[in-house]
Protein backbone atom coordinates (compact mmCIF):
# COMPACT_ATOMS: atom_id res chain seq x y z
CA UNK A 1 0.00 0.00 0.00
CA UNK A 2 1.45 3.34 -1.05
CA UNK A 3 -0.54 5.53 1.33
CA UNK A 4 -2.45 5.11 4.57
CA UNK A 5 -5.15 7.43 5.79
CA UNK A 6 -6.07 8.53 9.30
CA UNK A 7 -9.14 10.64 10.02
CA UNK A 8 -9.30 12.94 13.02
CA UNK A 9 -12.13 15.31 13.99
CA UNK A 10 -11.73 17.88 11.24
CA UNK A 11 -8.52 16.60 9.63
CA UNK A 12 -7.36 13.88 7.30
CA UNK A 13 -3.72 12.82 7.49
CA UNK A 14 -2.13 10.73 4.74
CA UNK A 15 1.10 8.81 5.32
CA UNK A 16 3.10 8.14 2.17
CA UNK A 17 4.81 4.76 2.51
CA UNK A 18 7.17 4.95 -0.43
CA UNK A 19 10.19 7.02 -1.40
CA UNK A 20 8.77 8.58 -4.58
CA UNK A 21 5.64 10.67 -4.96
CA UNK A 22 4.21 10.34 -8.45
CA UNK A 23 0.88 11.28 -10.02
CA UNK A 24 -0.81 8.04 -8.93
CA UNK A 25 -0.09 8.74 -5.25
CA UNK A 26 -1.42 12.30 -5.54
CA UNK A 27 -4.56 11.11 -7.33
CA UNK A 28 -5.23 8.61 -4.51
CA UNK A 29 -4.83 11.36 -1.92
CA UNK A 30 -7.17 13.75 -3.75
CA UNK A 31 -9.79 11.07 -4.44
CA UNK A 32 -9.78 9.88 -0.80
CA UNK A 33 -10.06 13.33 0.75
CA UNK A 34 -12.99 15.39 1.93
CA UNK A 35 -13.18 19.05 0.94
CA UNK A 36 -14.66 19.99 4.33
CA UNK A 37 -11.62 18.74 6.26
CA UNK A 38 -8.05 19.98 6.47
CA UNK A 39 -5.67 17.65 4.65
CA UNK A 40 -2.08 16.95 5.62
CA UNK A 41 0.54 14.63 4.17
CA UNK A 42 3.34 13.07 6.20
CA UNK A 43 6.43 12.95 3.97
CA UNK A 44 8.77 11.25 6.43
CA UNK A 45 9.69 8.44 4.00
CA UNK A 46 9.64 10.49 0.78
CA UNK A 47 12.98 11.14 -0.91
CA UNK A 48 11.86 12.25 -4.40
CA UNK A 49 8.92 14.00 -6.03
CA UNK A 50 8.17 13.19 -9.66
CA UNK A 51 4.77 14.79 -10.08
CA UNK A 52 3.72 18.10 -11.59
CA UNK A 53 0.23 17.40 -10.28
CA UNK A 54 1.64 17.40 -6.73
CA UNK A 55 3.24 20.81 -7.33
CA UNK A 56 -0.04 22.17 -8.76
CA UNK A 57 -1.94 20.95 -5.69
CA UNK A 58 0.57 22.68 -3.41
CA UNK A 59 0.19 25.93 -5.34
CA UNK A 60 -3.60 25.67 -5.04
CA UNK A 61 -3.19 24.95 -1.30
CA UNK A 62 -5.16 21.68 -1.41
CA UNK A 63 -3.09 20.14 1.37
CA UNK A 64 -0.33 20.88 3.86
CA UNK A 65 2.89 18.96 4.39
CA UNK A 66 4.85 17.92 7.46
CA UNK A 67 7.91 15.80 8.38
CA UNK A 68 9.78 16.76 5.22
CA UNK A 69 13.33 15.60 4.57
CA UNK A 70 15.68 18.55 4.09
CA UNK A 71 16.32 17.66 0.42
CA UNK A 72 12.59 17.56 -0.34
CA UNK A 73 12.04 20.82 1.54
CA UNK A 74 14.79 22.50 -0.47
CA UNK A 75 13.52 21.11 -3.77
CA UNK A 76 9.96 22.27 -3.15
CA UNK A 77 11.06 25.69 -1.94
CA UNK A 78 13.09 26.20 -5.10
CA UNK A 79 10.43 24.76 -7.41
CA UNK A 80 7.41 26.65 -6.14
CA UNK A 81 6.84 30.14 -7.45
CA UNK A 82 8.10 32.90 -5.16
CA UNK A 83 9.20 30.35 -2.53
CA UNK A 84 5.80 29.95 -0.86
CA UNK A 85 5.92 26.44 0.54
CA UNK A 86 3.57 26.05 3.47
CA UNK A 87 4.70 23.13 5.59
CA UNK A 88 5.01 22.17 9.24
CA UNK A 89 7.64 20.47 11.34
CA UNK A 90 5.31 17.72 12.60
CA UNK A 91 1.66 16.73 13.00
CA UNK A 92 1.20 18.64 16.25
CA UNK A 93 2.23 21.89 14.57
CA UNK A 94 -0.23 21.21 11.75
CA UNK A 95 -3.01 20.41 14.20
CA UNK A 96 -2.37 23.53 16.30
CA UNK A 97 -1.56 25.65 13.22
CA UNK A 98 1.76 26.94 14.53
CA UNK A 99 5.43 26.92 13.47
CA UNK A 100 4.62 26.88 9.79
CA UNK A 101 7.43 27.27 7.27
CA UNK A 102 6.44 30.17 5.06
CA UNK A 103 8.41 32.21 2.52
CA UNK A 104 11.48 30.00 2.52
CA UNK A 105 13.83 31.76 0.13
CA UNK A 106 17.08 30.37 -1.12
CA UNK A 107 19.82 32.25 -2.89
CA UNK A 108 22.02 30.46 -5.36
CA UNK A 109 25.44 32.07 -5.81
Image (cartoon, rainbow, N blue to C red):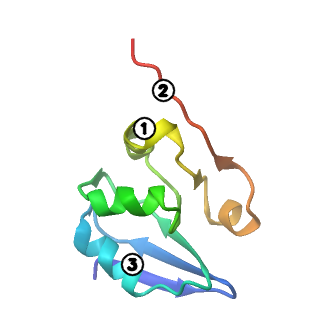
Q: Residues within 10 Å of mark 1 (few under 14, many from 20)?
A: some
**Tags 1 and 3 in contact by the CB under 8 Å rule?**
no
Q: Position of residue 103 (x, y in %)?
A: 60, 38
**Quadrant placement of the C terminus:** top left
Q: CA distance from mark 1 to mark 3?
A: 23 Å
Nearer the N terminus, badge 2 or badge 1?
1
Disc 2: which residue: 106
The residue located at (68%, 84%) in the rendering is 10
Dot 2: within a 10 Å radius of its alpha carbon, few (fewer than 14), some, or many (20 or more) residues? few
Q: Residue at x 38, y 59 (%)?
A: 56
Element at badge 1? Answer: helix
Quadrant position of residue 53: bottom left
Q: Earlier in the sequence, mark 2 or mark 3?
A: 3
Asked if the residues shown at circle 2 and circle 1 are in contact, with their CB atoms under 8 angstroms apart, the answer is yes
Q: Which residue is mark 3?
A: 29
What residue sits right under mark 1 in the picture?
74
Amino acid sequence: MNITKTIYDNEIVFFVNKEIIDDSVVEKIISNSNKNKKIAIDLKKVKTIKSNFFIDCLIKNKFKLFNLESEVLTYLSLTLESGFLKSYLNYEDFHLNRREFVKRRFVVL
